[in-house]
Amino acid sequence: MRTVNILWAEDKDANFLKYSRKLKEYFGERGLLAEITRAVDGNELFRHLTYPSERFDILLTDIDMPNFDGIKAVKRLRMSYPGLPMIIISAFTGEDVFAPILSDLVSQKIISGYFPAGEDEAWCEAIWRAIVRRAPTILHLSDIHFGSEHAFQEKLQVEDLMSLVLREITAKEKIDLVVVSGDLTSRGTEQEFEHAADFLSSIARTLQLGPERIVIVPGNHDIYRGEEPNRRFSKFVEFLDGFYRALPDPRVAFTRFPALYDEERQWLHWNAKKHQDESLYSVAIFDDLRTIVIGLNSVISIGDDRLNLSKIEPKQLIKIAEELNNLSPPQSHYFRIAVFHHNPVAVPSFSSEGEPERIVRNPALVLHELIKNRVRLALHGHTHYSIGFKYLPYLLDGDRTLSSPLVVVGAGTLSGRDLQAAQSYYHMTVIRCDLDEAGSVPSATLTPYRLKDDWLGWESIPPVKITFS
């Protein structure tokens, strides 16, 4: 049963006991466990939010409280916690002095709503909707390159460098998903994958996420080149199996890999006689976020002269389309994200490096199929170049339903050692999706972070707003 963490500011003991009991019953009937932390006034509200070990899915507050009232609190908190839903529940919401103020707070999107304390069904439902109907906030990492091409070879660890900035980010908003778009390793060795698993586990602990909230696709450095061509993905799949096996029920993650999951033995397995490059695809469904993350393999493993080239096989695109077409409402209407390693559009750095052939070799087909399958956001790595495109085809005499934009976002390298001036180093991106009243995702805000030159901390780069229309 999923647990949601709720912070509730209510100074009267009897009211808090009554209201919290009602909310726990409401959530329990719907399969969620509500853990409710109480604050007796506005000052304690701030203390709970700034305490690093506490993370909350929603904030509830009364209006009339000692020291710092609820209206002043939500106005102050919205600046520091833009992704935290807030709802006011009070016996005073109907009073003339408060009604216009509360209405303005809703219109300014400072709070999600306000309710009289006696209307418990109404505010229970509003809290439920605010928690389960939320757009995802995603941490996008790529090209970490554990091994010979990892930047931090000595005592300094990338986990240590990231822990501080991740705590700073999560103090303001909750990260829901981590997407890793390939090249976890340098040579695809077992030891490098062990380092990668330790790193991702530390990220999960810092963000208070389970392993199932981390979506991983392979990069061209993640195939083991010392192996026979048809076995080069074996170590990567073994890494996936070991990483997700830490879950109480690994099937939660295993079943997102339809071609690799052996249901009888309850494991992920690469069979050299059975599996091809297009077998490494995944469909991860997150019902609480109403989001689907599609993982595609863009790596060519056959032929030693092609290991840096890329292609997403048409067979893989067909399998993905079949998986998506088999979904029923409401899952069939979820927001769709695709992730793969190689870039589908040439980036400016390729002009100087002279390597435009390193993009996905069938980009038109891939982009066409993603749009056809209603994917709105595609994430990739490979180039070590942080860049975004909006791909919008105009089919003048064809299927006009395909003329919807696809936003393509590439991440720089988190810790790649091969530094070149055109590329983005020690880089990660936070993608905060927006939710409209209809439950759709019309836009998102991208906030890149990079390590300062002196390596003493991270800096956020001014955010970029993207729209999916």
Image: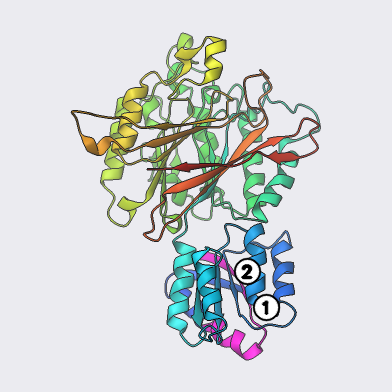
As drawn, the residue found furthest toward the bottom would be 14
Q: In this view, does 372 lie above or below 204?
A: above
In-front residue for pair 398/134 = 398
Q: What kind of element bears circle 2?
A: helix
Q: What kind of element bears circle 1?
A: loop
In-front residue for pair 280/166 = 166
Quadrant in the picture for residue 295: top left
Q: Residue 192: image x %, image y %?
A: 64, 29
In-front residue for pair 43/106 = 106
Q: Which residue is drawn at 43% across and 74% down?
A: 125
Q: Which residue type does callout 2 highlight?
A: Val
Q: Can residue 271 be seen in this view?
A: yes
Q: In this view, does 131 lie above or below 227?
A: below
Disc 1: CA contacts within 10 A as few (<14), some (14-19) or many (>=20): some
Specify the color scheme.
Answer: rainbow
Measured Cα–Cα span from mark 1 to mark 2: 9 Å
Quadrant in the picture for residue 430: top right
- The quarter of the rendered structure image containing the C terminus is top left
Q: Residue 460: image x %, image y %?
A: 67, 41
Q: Which residue type does callout 1 highlight?
A: Asp
- Image check: 45 left or right of 264? right
Q: Residue 308: image x %, image y %?
A: 50, 16
> What stretch of residues is rendered in magenta?
1-21
Disc 2: CA contacts within 10 A as few (<14), some (14-19) or many (>=20): many
Say which mark, if any, is on residue 69: 1
Q: Residue at x 55, y 48 (%)?
A: 211
Say which mark, if any, is on residue 74: 2
Residue 164 is covered by the magenta coloring: no
Q: Which of marks 1 and 2 is nearer the N terminus?
A: 1
Q: Is residue 50 above or below residue 207?
A: below
Residue 14 is covered by the magenta coloring: yes
